[in-house]
Each structure stands twice: as C-alpha cells, then as structure tokens.
Image (spheres, rainbow, N blue to C red):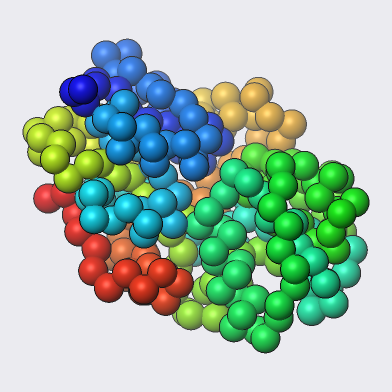
C-alpha cells in the first residue's frame, strides 16, 4: 500500500476550517472524526492529518510531527467543556465522550490534580443522554459550542483555561502528523499548501470573513461567535505552544521526546 500523495486528512469539526477552506482542488481531503484520523495516517490513507495529541502520544514511535500547524489554544477554548448542574467537586460521575482522547486524558489529569475521583462512563457525545446518566458530561468540538449556546448555565469547566491555570502554559489539543517513513518532499508539499491557507486567514480580512460565513452556514452558531472562536482555537503552532505540547505529553503520558518530520 502506498501513501496517497495528494490526500490530506481533515478533522470533521470546524477547528481546521482556516486551513482547509479554499484549499487547492489538486488536494484530496479525507474528512473523519479526529480519533479515526490516527488510523488513517497509520494505514497510509493520507499523507498528513490532524489527530488528537493523545493519538500522537500513543503512536509516537511511528509518527512524526508536522511543524507550524496544529489545533491550539491560549486559555479559554470554548469547545472542550464540562457540563453539569452541579459544581465539579460535587460530581460523583462524569460522562466521557467516545469521540475524544486528548480531552478525556486532560480531564483525568486535572481531576487527579484537584483530588477528585468521579466515576467515568464512556458514551456517545449527546449532552441530554450523558446528563441523564451522570452528574457531568465532557463535550468537545461543534457539540460543545452548540451546547454552550443553548445551555450556558450548565458550563462548569473550560479545559483550555483549566490547563493554563494549572501549568501556566498554552494547550495543544491536536497535532498534524505523518508516518515517519513518508517521503519528506510529500510532507513539505502538503505543509506548504496548508500553511498558505493559514497565512491568508491571518492576513486577509475578507478571506477570514468567508471562512467564518461558511462555518456559520454549516452550524447553528452566529458569525460573531465563530469569529471569536477562531481566536480561541487557532492553527498556528508557535514555540510557546510547542513548549506547552511537550509539557502535556510528558506530564500526562510520560512521553519525554517529540520528533518533527524535519
């Protein structure tokens, strides 16, 4: 099996819209839930893909990081939230979503750091069902954003802020990766294409407006909320976020060294 040289994995949330909206048609985009993309990369279905940081931690012997791009935050993230009608310290059980790994492991670490040990129940990411069975519920991505819009009084913890408050460092929820045996020229071509889109999003207000409008059309969220969101969650992986990434991987998973593709 050979790597699809012109295929890039894409997370099936809006987190990477600034990278993929308007991407050159010569690229094939494989859209999947974040937890599935790890397998797609390992199976050589795509040349690179954004995967949960936890997915990289568990497969770092086979995967290399792509520089400059990721799914990052610097404080409140707005889309990785714990919901409930009790304060977290009073929750006896928390429903963990089956479509997440980085956020679940981060919440486990935070709970342990704060001396809390609620029962975990893994289930599908549906807020009403989760709270029917548990005191609390962790949601990520679009579901978290939409649930926070309709149930703002149930939001009890933003994990991006919780991580920064605990460590003083920014959080990287997702990283772009490739198999270590992928030809570097193929990786650089995909990297260049995505970085070009990111630079355009950061510098061209009209292009940014198009990205936000497109995201708004495919969700129940307002233009203003999404415009704010793309400042809370962003795709520029800078030196400070690499430091935060290293800290998370070491603290939560015991991964001492990370490796970039070049």
Q: In the shown orientation, is residue 195 left or right of residue 118?
A: left
Residue shown at 41% from the left, 45% from the top? 51
In this orientation, which residue lies closer to the viewer: 65 or 180? 180
Q: Residue furthest top?
A: 25
Furthest residue toward bottom: 115
Could you tell me which quadrant the N terminus lies in?
top left
> Which residue sits at x=27%, y=30%?
44
Q: Is residue 130 left or right of residue 71?
A: right
* x, y percent for residue 27: 29, 19
Q: From the viewer's side, name the closer residue of 239 and 57.
A: 57
User: From the viewer's perspective, is residue 149 above or below residue 258?
Assistant: above
User: Image check: 145 left or right of 29?
Assistant: right
In the foreground, 240 or 60 = 60
In this view, 166 is above or below 21: below
- Compared to 63, does 191 lie above or below? above
Find residue 125 and report its image quarter: top right
- Residue 207, image x, y percentages: 44, 29
Q: How many marks?
A: 0
Residue 34 visible in the shown view: yes
Quadrant housing residue 26: top left
Residue 2 or residue 193, whichever sits in front: 2
- The residue at 64%/24% (across/down) is 218
User: x and y percent of residue 242 in the render?
Assistant: 31, 64
Q: Is residue 240 visible?
A: no
User: Residue at 67% across / 86% down in the picture?
Assistant: 115
């Amino acid at each position: 099996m050979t790597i699809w040289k012109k295929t890039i994995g894409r997370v099936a949330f809006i987190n990477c819209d600034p990278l993929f909206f308007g991407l050159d048609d010569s690229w094939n985009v494989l859209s999947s839930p974040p937890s599935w993309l790890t397998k797609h990369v390992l199976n050589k279905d795509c040349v690179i893909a954004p995967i949960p940081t936890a997915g990289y931690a568990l497969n770092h012997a086979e995967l290399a990081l792509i520089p400059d791009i990721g799914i990052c935050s610097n404080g409140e993230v707005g889309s990785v939230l714990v919901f409930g009608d009790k304060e977290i310290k009073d929750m006896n059980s928390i429903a963990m979503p089956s479509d997440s790994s980085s956020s679940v492991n981060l919440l486990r670490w935070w709970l342990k750091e704060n001396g809390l040990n609620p029962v975990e129940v893994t289930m599908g990411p549906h807020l009403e069902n989760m709270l029917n069975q548990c005191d609390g519920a962790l949601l990520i991505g679009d579901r978290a954003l939409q649930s926070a819009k309709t149930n703002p009084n149930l939001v009890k913890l933003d994990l991006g802020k919780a991580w920064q408050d605990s460590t003083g460092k920014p959080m990287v929820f997702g990283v772009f990766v490739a198999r270590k045996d992928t030809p570097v020229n193929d990786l650089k071509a995909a990297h260049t294409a995505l970085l070009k889109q990111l630079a355009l999003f950061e510098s061209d207000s009209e292009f940014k407006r198009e990205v936000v409008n497109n995201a708004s059309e495919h969700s129940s969220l307002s233009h203003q909320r999404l415009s704010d969101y793309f400042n809370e969650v962003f795709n520029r992986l800078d030196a400070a976020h690499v430091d935060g990434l290293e800290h998370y991987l070491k603290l939560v998973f015991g991964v001492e060294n990370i490796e970039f593709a070049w």
